[in-house]
Image (cartoon, coloured by chain):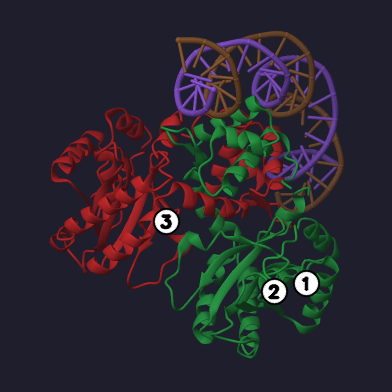
Chain colours: A red, B green, C brown, D purple
Amino acid sequence: MTAAGDGTVGKALDVLDLVAAQERPVRFADLHRMSPLPKATLYRLAQTLVSQGMLVQNTENGTYSLGVRLVRLAHAAWRHASLAPIARRHLDILSQSSKLTVHLAQMEAGHVLYVDKRNLRESVQMFSEAGKVGPAYCTGVGKAMLAYMSVSQLDRTLRLQSFHRYTPKTVVDEAALRLQLERIRSRGFARDREEHEPGIICVAVPIFTANDRVLGAVSVSGTVIQTDFKTLEAQVPGLRQCADAIAEDAMHWDFPADHMAEFEGRQG
Amino acid sequence: MTAAGDGTVGKALDVLDLVAAQERPVRFADLHRMSPLPKATLYRLAQTLVSQGMLVQNTENGTYSLGVRLVRLAHAAWRHASLAPIARRHLDILSQSSKLTVHLAQMEAGHVLYVDKRNLRESVQMFSEAGKVGPAYCTGVGKAMLAYMSVSQLDRTLRLQSFHRYTPKTVVDEAALRLQLERIRSRGFARDREEHEPGIICVAVPIFTANDRVLGAVSVSGTVIQTDFKTLEAQVPGLRQCADAIAEDAMHWDFPADHMAEFEGRQG
DNA sequence: GCACGTTGTTCCAATATTTGAAACGACGTT
DNA sequence: AACGTCGTTTCAAATATTGGAACAACGTGC
């Protein structure tokens, strides 16, 4: 599941991921049970990470959690490598014109990474929303990105999926998914018919680079009682305009880090 | 400046910090110039980090930026190790009752790390605010935390400061600072008289753990044309109440990671 | 067109570091 | 007192990191 790590740092980062995956602080024994690494190795790695501020260790019970140093790094990462800073303006516009919940997402290690969100009703929830990950195969933004990947990229990404039936409507069959992607391509946008969360539907479009690679995706979503696909799809032109505006800004931006490169580099 | 790193991972994380410190994507040669590491070592480290998704490399010009994997990790870090999730409710209350800008901060490697913010006027700015770092010796939240540290903690933290005169009113003398801290202790709250940003004043109080260690700090701030210290200090009881409420919740919370431990562990 | 400085990348043997089975002391439980 | 669990440390063998130096690939100026 976790990619074979290069060298010591790879293992160290795997440990970080392991801690991150946990919902609560973990004891050493728990880590040991989950990690393939031998006890002593794991122990020294954890110690190093604590000493580096990437993990924090509770002084009384010795449990590990992620360290706040990561928050500082992520602040920079968010500015450097995410579309969020350049997309901000455009998301605001889309949010106000559509009166719907707007999501901005990118692809990260086969998963959908939400980097920004707009919701007119509730006040924005900072990190609690940005940084969240979701499945690629059953979300609007995920499918929008998958649909426009190159064949090799798509294959590699699909290999990373572990299909899980979130709702009765979740598509857990790769062949069926590929069929969906084709329809998305011909249609120009992706739908999520309560495939990830019951009662939540959404419509999403991809964002492209100058050379037609997928950078990310934008979506508008709502609950089935508040809205329907007729309403959502009426927003597709607005979505497209928003995505294009982001793409345009991303071009003239000086930081057009190739967001797929990061993903390509990793060995599945 | 950057702590001597333990082993390979320490060096790798230093590279991350180096990239994070830069405002824009860096070329390899730039990194090489800034890092003490030899060319080949640095090169392999950077490659590893890219392969791990911690850095992204622009495919056309080869420049490095921080990778979005960090954003995902930070999301978890923010939930695990920051006060933000448990403080949210209380910050909202303080923000609405005071009608002022509210900051929540913690100490990280000798610097102030802002983990949340409230501002009634502008909509919240997600990562662009949370994750920001600032100096400890000339901000309200920073001084509030410094004032209530243990002697050894304080010494260690002060050693990490690189005093810089941000404004004409910035105190850049350690002795003077220590005097200020004493006054803060007797007063119970800290002031920032335009010491960090011209025109910005603030009042801050520390947040304590059950055993009287400093967890973080809360502040209310404003511009000198909008507000004055009389107004700000009228909010001190509200601030205190907010801080205590956060501390109370942090106790009953299951994640009371010792946020100073992370800092203590690091060798200056 | 040639020489030059720069940049990113690769080699390779010496070296230092990671490695991991095993042992250890400290608790808490039965 | 015997046992399981937990976190921590030891030590020689194995391996990965190290970094000086050479390398191709540009781009620049002369």
Disc 2/disc 3 C-alpha distance (Å): 32 Å
Q: Which residue is mark 2?
A: B206
Residue A188, how many percent across, how many down?
17, 46
Circles 2 and 3 on the same subunit: no
* B202 in relation to A203, above or below: below
Q: Is residue B19 visible?
A: yes
> Toward the viewer: D1 or B97?
B97
Identify the amino acid type marked 2.
Pro
Q: Which residue is mark 1?
A: B147
Assign a secondary structure to mark 2: strand
* A203 in relation to B207, above or below: above
Identify the amino acid type marked 3.
Pro
Identify the residue at image location x=24%, y=52%.
A204
The reply to whether discs 1 and 2 touch (Cβ–Cβ < 8 Å) is: yes
Identify the amino acid type marked 1.
Ala
> What is the chain identity of the residue bearing mark 3?
A
Identify the residue at image location x=57%, y=47%.
B22
Assign a secondary structure to mark 3: helix
Residue A85's label in the rendered image is 3
Q: Nearer the viewer, mark 2 or mark 3?
A: 3
The reply to whether discs 3 and 1 touch (Cβ–Cβ < 8 Å) is: no
> Toward the viewer: B3 or A57?
B3
Residue A205, how many percent across, how many down?
24, 49
> What is the chain identity of the residue bearing mark 1?
B
